[in-house]
Image (cartoon, rainbow, N blue to C red):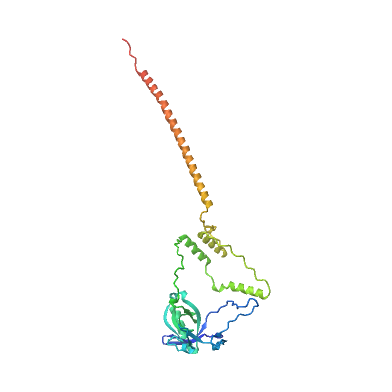
């Protein structure tokens, strides 16, 4: 790879096949870096490397590595010592297995590198390994040594090249204990349906269209200060977040996403976001108590009125039946007398 400096030279060990390669960084940082300055006069703040024994500043060529023992003793370790470590991965990327890509936990992924073929003699075995990885739909798990320690790596195909991702050792990945909510939460099917609808509405995105807006804004501020102009105004901050009804928030999100894509939301997707009821205040409690009291009083008055009406009706019916009973008996007696024939005297 022209115009790219390799950071490590070695070989890929693929069974009995050895492939000379060069390790090249696959990523680069575009972040804006700052220098430490003296705020009073703008002078640069620099760190000087000073030898404690001689009390003088030393150059980079005079600086080496050393291991500090438990008693504070420094044991020098040279690059030659590291180059002759008694391990096969000192200058070799040793492939130990081929596994499906989904077996690799993304939490283990670290830095990314490109593996460039080291010369014309490496072209054939390099291409062989690349095509074998393509046809198997697998990735290679390898061990290698870099910057003073042995590491784990994953080899995969990227375009026409082989890339290697540094992997953390399994014991270097923390378990997610104490991260998830410790309260019991019930998610309804309708809420899941709305979440699925929101995911479908947002759809996919081309990662090439994404960019660092923070870096862009920072560049505008620096450019304004260089030209002596006022820095761009900060946009108004969003209002403080409120506790919202989850269903209403999901429905409004789906509607907004569809409108942004030029689609018209369905009638059932229209909903207003309303705050979730908070705990009742003292005023609310008093109002509720007065409402209960008035309800009880109205119920009692209704019961009294109903009882009085029932009493009057019963009294009327009793009096009427009592008054009519003697007249009916008397009429019956008169009719009986008329029907009896008179006896004639002989």
Q: Give the residue drawn at x 43%, y 31%.
A: 317
Task: Determine whether 292 is above or below 62 in the image.
Answer: above
Q: Give the residue drawn at x 50%, y 79%.
A: 111
Residue 268, x across and y down, in percent: 52, 57
Whether residue 223 is visible: yes
Work out whether residue 82 or residue 155 is closer to the camera in this orientation and state it.
Answer: 82
Residue 134, x across and y down, in percent: 46, 79
Give the farthest residue toward the left: 346
The C terminus - image quarter: top left
User: Residue 240 occupies which quadrant of the picture?
Assistant: bottom right
Work out whether residue 72 or residue 111 is closer to the camera in this orientation and state it.
Answer: 72
Q: Give the residue drawn at x 55%, y 74%.
A: 208
Q: Give the residue drawn at x 43%, y 79%.
A: 136
Residue 11, x across and y down, in percent: 46, 87
In the image: residue 132, left or right of residue 341: right
Number of numbered tags placed on the structure image: 0
Task: Determine whether 95 is above or below 262 in the image.
Answer: below
Give the farthest residue toward the top: 346
The N terminus - image quarter: bottom right
Task: Determine whether 249 is above or below 123 in the image.
Answer: above
Whether residue 160 is visible: no
User: Residue 344 occupies which quadrant of the picture?
Assistant: top left
In the image: residue 30, left or right of residue 79: right
Task: Determine whether 26 is above or below 320 in the image.
Answer: below
Work out whether residue 210 or residue 151 is closer to the camera in this orientation and state it.
Answer: 151
Residue 191, x across and y down, in percent: 48, 61
In the image: residue 257, left or right of residue 334: right
């Amino acid at each position: 790879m022209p115009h790219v400096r390799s950071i490590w030279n070695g070989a890929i060990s693929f069974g009995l096949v050895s492939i000379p390669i060069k390790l090249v960084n696959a990523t680069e940082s575009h972040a804006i870096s700052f220098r430490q300055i003296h705020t009073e006069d703008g002078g640069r703040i620099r760190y000087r490397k000073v030898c404690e024994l001689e009390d003088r500043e030393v150059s980079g060529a005079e600086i080496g590595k050393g291991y500090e023992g438990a008693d504070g003793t420094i044991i020098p370790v040279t690059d030659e010592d590291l180059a002759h470590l008694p391990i096969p991965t000192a200058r070799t990327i040793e492939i130990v297995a081929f596994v499906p890509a989904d077996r690799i936990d993304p939490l283990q992924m670290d830095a990314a590198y490109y593996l460039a073929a080291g010369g014309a003699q490496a072209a054939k075995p390099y291409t062989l390994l690349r095509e074998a990885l393509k046809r198997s739909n697998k990735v290679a798990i390898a061990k290698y040594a870099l910057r003073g320690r042995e590491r784990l790596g994953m080899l995969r195909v990227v375009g026409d090249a082989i890339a290697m991702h540094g992997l953390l050792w399994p014991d270097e990945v923390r378990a997610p204990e104490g991260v998830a909510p410790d309260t019991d939460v019930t998610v309804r099917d309708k809420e899941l349906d709305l979440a699925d609808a929101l995911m479908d509405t947002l759809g996919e995105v081309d990662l090439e269209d994404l960019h660092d807006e923070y870096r862009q804004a920072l560049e505008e501020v620096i450019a304004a200060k260089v030209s002596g102009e006022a820095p761009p105004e900060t946009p108004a901050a969003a209002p403080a977040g409120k506790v919202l009804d989850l269903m209403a928030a999901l429905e409004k999100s789906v509607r907004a996403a569809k409108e942004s894509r030029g689609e018209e939301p369905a009638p059932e997707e229209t909903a207003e976001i309303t705050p979730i009821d908070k705990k009742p205040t003292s005023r609310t409690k008093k109002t509720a108590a007065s409402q209960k009291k008035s309800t009880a009083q109205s119920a009692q008055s209704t019961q009294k009125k109903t009882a009085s009406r029932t009493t009057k009706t019963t009294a009327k019916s009793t009096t009427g039946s009592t008054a009519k009973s003697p007249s009916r008996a008397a009429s019956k007696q008169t009719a009986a007398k008329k029907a009896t024939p008179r006896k004639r005297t002989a």
